[in-house]
Image (tube, coloured by chain):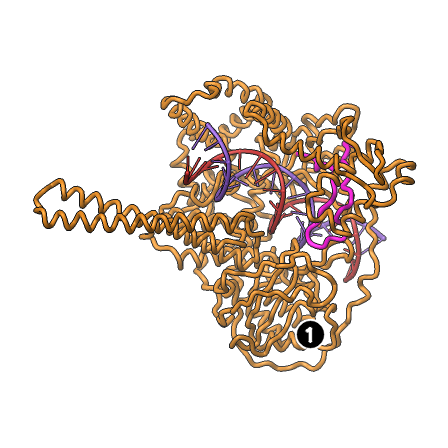
Chain colours: A orange, B red, C purple
Amino acid sequence: MGREKDAKGEGKAKYKATKLKRLSDNESAGAGGDAIKNSIKSAKSAEKTDSGKSPKKVKKSKTERHESASSPSESVKQEPMDDDFREKKKGLKRKRIKDEPMEGPSHSTATPSSKKKNKRHKQEEESDREAEKKKSKKKTEKVNSCLSQMVKKEEGEHPISKKPKRTKEEIEEARQLKIKKKEEEEQSRWRWWEEEKYEDGVKWKFLEHNGPYFPANYEPLPDNVHFYYNGKKVKLSLAAEEVALFFAQMLDHEYSTKKVFRDNFFKDWRKEMTHEERLLIQDLEKCDFGELHAMHKAKVEARKNMTKEEKLVVKEANQKIVDEYGYCLLDHHKERIGNFKIEPPGLFRGRGEHPKQGMLKKRIQPEDVIINCSKEGRIPIPPAGHRWKEVRHDNTVTWLASWTENIQGSIKYIMLNANSKLKGEKDWEKYEIARKLKSCVDDIRNQYMQDLKSKHMGTRQRAVALYFIDKLALRAGNEKEEGETADTVGCCSLRVEHITLHELLDGSECVVEFDFLGKDCIRYYNKVPVIRKVFKNLKLFLENKQPGDELFDRLNTSVLNKHLSSLMPGLTAKVFRTYNASITLQQQLKELTNKADSVAEKLLSYNRANRAVAILCNHQRAPPKTFDQSMANLQAKIDARKEQLALAKTELKQAKKEAKTKGSSDPKLQTLVERKKAAVKRCEEQLLKMEVQATDREENKQIALGTSKLNYLDPRISVAWCKNMEVLVDKIYNKSQRDKFAWAIDMTEADFEF
DNA sequence: CGCCAAACTTAGTAAATTACGT
DNA sequence: ACGTAATTTACTAAGTTTGGCG
């Protein structure tokens, strides 16, 4: 699929370096920390979608924010490092822990884990290798018989006795079962982090799966549902009807009213029509999808109103699909697949002002799909009457199947779940690289501070960009093809129109005001005091440029990353995000939590530390639909509780008075006093808890914590914190997060330092 | 070396499920 | 027991980085 590439390079105003200014500031660089002090009310783009070319369109409705004028010089505190992760990525071998107690260069923290592991898993103490073999055999069988087992299991239990309330024993039994299941799961978990890594690019030795799951074929409309054109009933061909229904289903959505969306849809829809249909249907405005829309709504409603039994049937059917297609066998271990379903056809909805919104995302056929698996072992069977596009056996990649999507012409992959070895190992490695950056970040910062004074314009641009990436955790910012995607930028692709320089703003000198749309059209708005050298460079970069010109005209991500990797193997722009996120969490946790706090308070602090990171990384969310409502509810509850507390207090006083006057010897009165005291205390605690909750929720209104938790924060920091603070890991990680971070939970001791 | 396809991570939102208060 | 709110999972778009090729 040829993507047309055209006149984009044209506009690059190549900037001639003017004379070099000697700048005299010598503040040191520093990152991460500052942003935290920013007020929580970060600006979610009011006009998330307003991305147009016109300069500064976005800029109007900024929430006034007063940045703390914290000097950028307070750099992140450095901890002594025991880590010496130094060899090149490629030759990385992980030592088998039990065999050789590991002075392994790369994963210093694995050592403590081995100790613990020995403690915890005495049962498996037969020779490691033997156990391995046994396990894998068992697993293989398990995979095959998995479905039947599951069915059996359910039958075995008390088939959830219809309505009758369950007896205490039954509840207890269920609980026991849960515990048992949990243990079983723990037992069968693949502890890949204790195994040796494969050489170089090899990702697996054996891979077997059932191929992707295809969405059901299109069901034609029932006879009583019609499409009308220009007021006349029109029976559409199957293909055209399917696409019409896609549109009808979106009629409630705002974007079905957008011009670009409608135009794209109509154009693509017409491509699906027969010649006759195309002749007839020329104007979208004359199309009446009313009955299709109504049918869809009725279906949704019906689904909602299904009885318990019906829902159970659906659930079981889904489970069956998961059992059959949701797992693969990778090097003798059963692994969950992340996205085993082929994406169903529909109308493309990009984010923000996407030029391709509304285009038809086509149905994928087996003939479009490439399968990747072992040569030996079963090869997935394509759906009846079909064949695969290709079957290949490439063990240097991690995907099981792929296809090319028709909107952008990019490849989509079917890959493993986050709790798999392949994903986990990579994740671990990511954090090790970030920790390595910790050990040399000072040098790198000194270097780019020097480079700010370089006589080469390119070098200075690189230095300023790096300063932003480090201090503000901006993304690298690849260039994008105009017209293919929404107009968003990152660091290297910033344009003149995205920053405003203020010699003096809100009492701070040298303030850079950023306002641009980043990934997913999320607005980045920030006013940041920078060091003078950076400020002066920026002024220089802006000279003789138009708002639409690139700020860093001598720089792109590839230049930047090449430079970075020369400073430290494995270093790229995004490592700074990981590093600054993780180091910020660690530092904030240290600052905010006390061992003496209650669990609720500790968790609030954890959330706050997490939030500091989310703010740094600009992870936003739409305020929940019901936010104001639920906030009001909570407030009402707090008020009610306050009243109750007041009442309890007067009662206590009353009781005390009585106890005093009517002879303090009366034990009944004494216990009454005690009881009232307890009530007051309980009330106070509950009130505090709710107030804490309210604070937490309010502060979180438009901040998304999940993204940083899942992708930027070294889980070992959190696990170590839990150990130190005696907080259950379950309190901060839910089930799937615990699965994803199983490696960290298993290997991390309380003394872990990022 | 620049360009582009490939591969993989990161991202927000919608749907589904579970928890919770009445 | 039931309806609502909160949480979790599913989904897939949108980034970054690498490496091969002309």
Could you say which quadrant of the image residue A114 lies in? top left
Residue at (53, 18) in percent of width and height: A152
Give the extent of the magenta segment: A341-367
On screen, residue A271 above or below A355: above
In the picture provided, is A41 more to the left or to the right than A695? Answer: right
Whether residue A724 is visible, yes or no, is no
Residue at (59, 81) in percent of width and height: A23
Dot 1 amino acid type: Phe
Whether residue A178 is visible, yes or no, is yes
Assign a secondary structure to mark 1.
helix
On screen, residue A311 above or below A570: above
In the picture provided, is A262 more to the left or to the right than A299? Answer: right
What main secondary structure does the magenta stretch of the protein show? loop
A753 within the magenta span: no
- Residue A551 position in % (x across, y down): 69, 69
In the picture provided, is A596 more to the left or to the right than A381? Answer: left
Residue on which disc 1 sits: A541
Chain identifier of the residue bearing label 1 in the image: A
- How packed is label 1: few (under 14 Cα within 10 Å), some, or many (20 or more)? many
On screen, residue A531 above or below A367: below
- Residue A352 position in % (x across, y down): 69, 54
- Residue A207 position in % (x across, y down): 65, 32
Judging depth in this view, the residue of A752 and A727 nearest the camera is: A727
